[in-house]
Image (tube, rainbow, N blue to C red):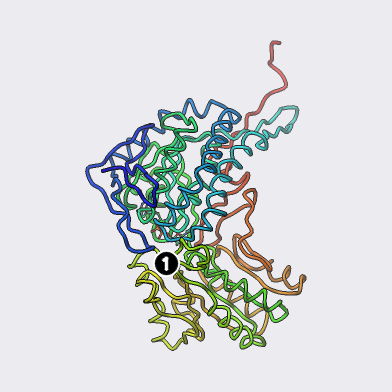
Amino acid sequence: MSLITVAGVSVDTRHWIGGQRVSSSSTFESVSPVDGTVLGAVARGGKDEADAAVAAAKAAFTQWSRMGAQARAEILFRLADLVEEHVEPLAQLETMDNGSLLRSHRRGVMPRVAMNIRFFAEYAATSLHHPEFQTRGHTNHVSWDPSGVAVIITPWNAPLMLATWRIGPALASGDTVVAKPPEWAPLTASYFADLTHQAGLPAGVFNVVQGLGTEAGAALTANRDVSRICFTGSVPTAKVIAHAAADNLIPCSFELGGKSPTVIFDDADLDLAVDLAIEQYDNAGQVCLAGTRLLVQDTIAEAFTERFVERARTIRQGDPRDEDTQIGPNIHLAHVERVRGFIDRAQADGATVVYGGQVNAELGPHYLQPTLIRDAAPGSEILTQEVFGPVLTMQTFSTEEQVLELANGTEFGLAACVVTGDRSRAERFCEHLVAGTIWVNCFFVRDLSAPFGGSKKSGIGREGGLWSFDFYADVKNTVYAPTGWKA
Ligand code: NAD
């Protein structure tokens, strides 16, 4: 069966290729982290489906790429409007599929999905000017030309938001797209495919191949007709994809993991510092940008810990469909075990679990308590590797120099949060902090025109605003001579 119904929302879980639903001979199950129920069977694609989707996208490229940014924008604006009209079913599906909060999907995430489409369509149509400049009387004309077929592979922690953050600029730039949604949360991509059809996207411009990363994903990255690979996910998978891309010499945009610091100086507003630290538990810690390493100045360490634990006790963990829930479940049981392994090994190594550390048995096996760990051994895995669960560590420091070394002391460089009351200290400190995004006295403020990406192992490239078009397009310079013209 291909049509499944989740929370009253029906979704066709076959692939979407060349404007049609396509089955596979095998399927995989989508299981809800909310209560462990099996939501239904999803088509499990492999090389045949991947190749068919790339062929469909390639066939649609000429028409879509030559249509012009304004005509494309009109269709994409309709798509954004349709997403807004379908926020509720999309929110319901996503919550059951990946366990994130329903109210966040309704008020933040799904409206942002619409914005991902609308913003880049508008940018391409109105802000992507073609600069011209002179060289010895010759005119250089710069253009952002569509490049071909973009393959977009994304993870489960914010499935449709992360997918459309790449799909939006790819389509707006004139590329055609094959998306491979995460096998742990595949449903909203299938629902979204129907919206692209209703919006009037020509057949083949947008395609979805469902399936496992090692099957459908690997086949897509190996296809020689692909012009761009856009990947959001973990560092180990990125290394595999980089090899595939190297064989075809295709540009990649990688948005990967993090181990970001939240740096709290003793001149900070303590209430604000505690609020920002608690915010790092959002989405049950399954946020690439989360500042999970709390680095707290030693002079306020005890006062901070006391206030933090007081606040942590008030966090309402529960069913993500409930309006007042603040933290829901983790994505699947193997992931919960993986996170628990980090906690157990840290404890065995001498670290102290100051708060949490257990599965919240009343709620079920997917619900790991928000956890704070102190006194972990310097250089230990809990301080250096991405845990991707509701686990924060706390280390102390005495000087700016010392905390800079701690903050920059992992192989990641995705983001950082800095809390201080001293503006000149903030500017001095941030200048040497290695991170794609730094938030000072705030967290998660995002503007789609700002550059976004990671330093070191947290990624390759930047997207957002013009940076997105630099990636999806082939930037071309045409030089016109002043002479040789007949008319
Ligand atoms: P993952 O790397 O396991 O999977 C991500 C996607 O890659 C999935 O769709 C998967 O099916 C696919 N995939 C797996 N193996 C593949 C292969 N060999 N070839 C092609 N595709 C393959 O990551 P995950 O566990 O789904 O997601 C969590 C990770 O994503 C964390 O590291 C997190 O930090 C990162 N992330 C980064 C950002 C960012 O913007 N930097 C945002 C969200 C998540």
Residue 99 drawn at (x, y percent): 42, 61
| In this view, 301 is above or below 71 | below
Label 1 C-beta lies within 8 Å of the nearest ligand 1 atom: no
Q: Based on the displayed image, in which of its 4 quarters is residue 58 positioned?
A: top left
| In this view, 143 is above or below 430 | above
Residue 237 drawn at (x, y percent): 39, 57
Q: Which residue is mark 1?
A: 329
| In this view, 353 is above or below 28 | below
Which quarter of the rendering shows the C terminus?
top right
Residue 112 drawn at (x, y percent): 57, 49
Residue depicted at 37% across the width and 32% down the height: 18
Front one among 10 and 169: 10
**Outermost residue, top direction?**
487
Query: How many discs appear?
Result: 1
For ligand 1, the image quadrant comes to bottom left
Front one among 30 and 252: 30
Q: Based on the displayed image, in which of its 4 quarters is residue 455 positioned?
A: bottom right
Residue depicted at 63% across the width and 37% down the height: 122
The three-letter amino acid code for the residue at tag 1 is Pro
| In this view, 196 is above or below 259 | above
Compared across the picture, whether 107 is left or right of 156 comes to right
Compared across the picture, whether 328 is left or right of 184 comes to right
Tell me the SS state at disc 1: loop
Which quarter of the rendering shows the N terminus?
top left
Residue 459 drawn at (x, y percent): 51, 57
Q: Say few, some or many: other residues with alpha carbon within 10 Å of mark 1 (under 14 / 14 to 19 / 20 or more).
A: many
Residue depicted at 71% across the width and 28% down the height: 139
